[in-house]
Amino acid sequence: MTGILVDWLVEVAEEYHLTNETLHLSKQYVDRFLCQKKVTRARLQLVGVSGMLIAAKFEEIFPPGVDDFVYISDNMFSRQQVIEMETLM
């Protein structure tokens, strides 16, 4: 499942023209988080979105906002859920 998540994160990075560093850092955040916590399959995409949000804040000059990541995940998660997962990560 993480392979599918990484493929999706690559597509998100291409859609928002994010740097390769952002993509690699987000994958590392996701991997580190998954080593520490058990996550259900339904919330795996939320972990990926939150990891990419954190990485974009560090690497990008103009990072996409929380609402952009809610939109790209097809409104599967609320803005509040993304913020809570970001805080947890």
Image: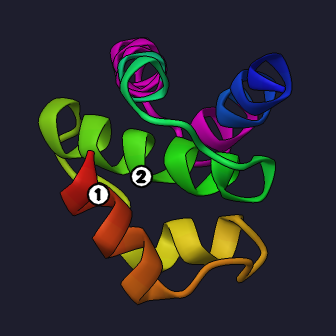
Report x, y in % for residue 78.
Answer: 54, 87
Q: Is the magenta stretch mostly helix, strand or loop?
A: helix
Residue 83 to residue 26: above or below: below
Instruction: Tell me the kind of residue under disc 2.
Output: Ser
Asked if labels 1 and 2 touch by Cβ distance under 8 angstroms, the answer is yes
Q: Which portion, as a residue range, is magenta?
A: 11-30
| Local SS, label 1 | helix
Locate the N terminus and report the quarter of the image it occupies. top right
| Local SS, label 2 | helix
Q: Residue at x 34, y 18 (%)?
A: 25
Report x, y in % for residue 51.
Answer: 40, 40
Q: Which residue is drawn at 44% across and 17% down?
A: 35
The reply to whether residue 65 is in sight is: no
Report x, y in % for residue 38.
Answer: 55, 37
Q: In this view, does 4 lie to the left or right of 77?
A: right
- Within 10 Å of disc 2 (Cα), the crowding (few <14, some 14-19, many 20+) is many
Q: Is residue 32 magenta?
A: no
Instruction: Tell me the kind of residue under disc 1.
Output: Glu
Residue to which mark 2 is pinned: 50
Mark carried by residue 86: 1
Pick the front one: 39 or 68:
39
